[in-house]
Amino acid sequence: RTMNQQSSSPLLGIALMAAAMLLVPGVDGIAKTLSAAHSPLYISWARYAFASVFVLPWVLAQRGVHFLPREELPAHAMRTFFAAASMCFFFAAIAVSPIADVTSAYFVGPIVAAILSVLLLGEALTPRKIAALALGFVGAIIIVNPAGGIDAGLLLGVVAGVFFALYMIATRKTRASDPVSTLAFQCLFGAAILSPLAIWNWSLPSMGELGLLFLMGLISAVCHFMTISAFRHAEASLLAPLSYLELIGATVIGYLVFGDLPGIRILIGAVLIVAGGLILVQRRRAGAKVASAVH
């Protein structure tokens, strides 16, 4: 997100961003646990709806009753649609495949966004982008492994990454807006557009599952707040590479909760994808718009 940068405390920004990225897989772990009894589409709706429970009081205190963005509402709606679609595919993926494996596939998103920026935004096709695309493509092929029989979960993870790329492109096409208002709009509009799918796939949570849903909303809200705060203290070019810490969190959650560890093939693919992503962010300037994790 584009924000007024305060270079006085970059270490605080780094700490906040790192903590947010390590916490985000907690949402995925809860979603995977709930997927045993509930549809990923219902869980995706619940993630927005329960995050709103925590976001709304905060944004009302910060901005008052007129907190929603007042300009470019169609653009905000489009980027929220892409975010919601990405999350739906991601939650569907982790319902059937290990979290770390799916997260590895999902991280093709920033690389796809770099290529779409050439096609849709008219940005230059640089050797850096070509190298990133090559590494990301090879990494994604290694992870999905079509020759060995396509894993539906990993393929869904790649699709989630593509929608995340479209989300980032939509973010770049919108002018700078208040991140607090943008977050509130995304939670409310995301819940609204997913409501028909949630009703169609409705299932009543138990008291224990209701607690997990509230926890998922709380972690989501806290991670977004930390990400917003991080960009107030440090440059985007400094924070962007930290998004790959999510892979570490995903691996830890997957192992501790579900007993899953990525195989050597997934690790090799993930290394290539991360390398491609780091090539892209190495010289990204502070003025670039960086989107926080959306799933």
Image (cartoon, rainbow, N blue to C red):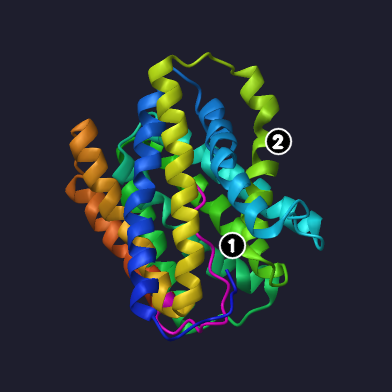
Which image quadrant is residue 206 in? Answer: top left
In the image, residue 255 lies at what x, y percent?
A: 19, 39
Looking at the picture, tell me which residue is in the foreground, 203 or 63. 63
**Residue at image location 19% in from the left, 37% down from the top:** 256
Circle 1 residues within 10 Å: few <14, some 14–19, many ≥20: many
In the image, residue 224 lies at what x, y percent?
A: 49, 55
* Residue receiving disc 1: 168
In the image, residue 20 lies at what x, y percent?
A: 38, 57
Looking at the picture, tell me which residue is in the foreground, 158 or 184. 184
Looking at the picture, tell me which residue is in the foreground, 148 or 88. 88
In the image, residue 276 lies at what x, y percent?
A: 38, 69
Name which residue type carries label 2.
Ala
Describe the element under mark 2 as helix, strand or loop. Answer: helix
Q: Is residue 291 magenta?
A: yes
Q: Which residues are magenta?
A: 281-295
Q: Which label number is shown at residue 192? A: 2
**Residue at image location 58% in from the left, 47% down from the top:** 55
Q: Is residue 48 magenta?
A: no
Q: Main secondary structure of the magenta part?
A: loop
Circle nearer the viewer, 1 or 2: 2
Residue 198 visible? The answer is yes
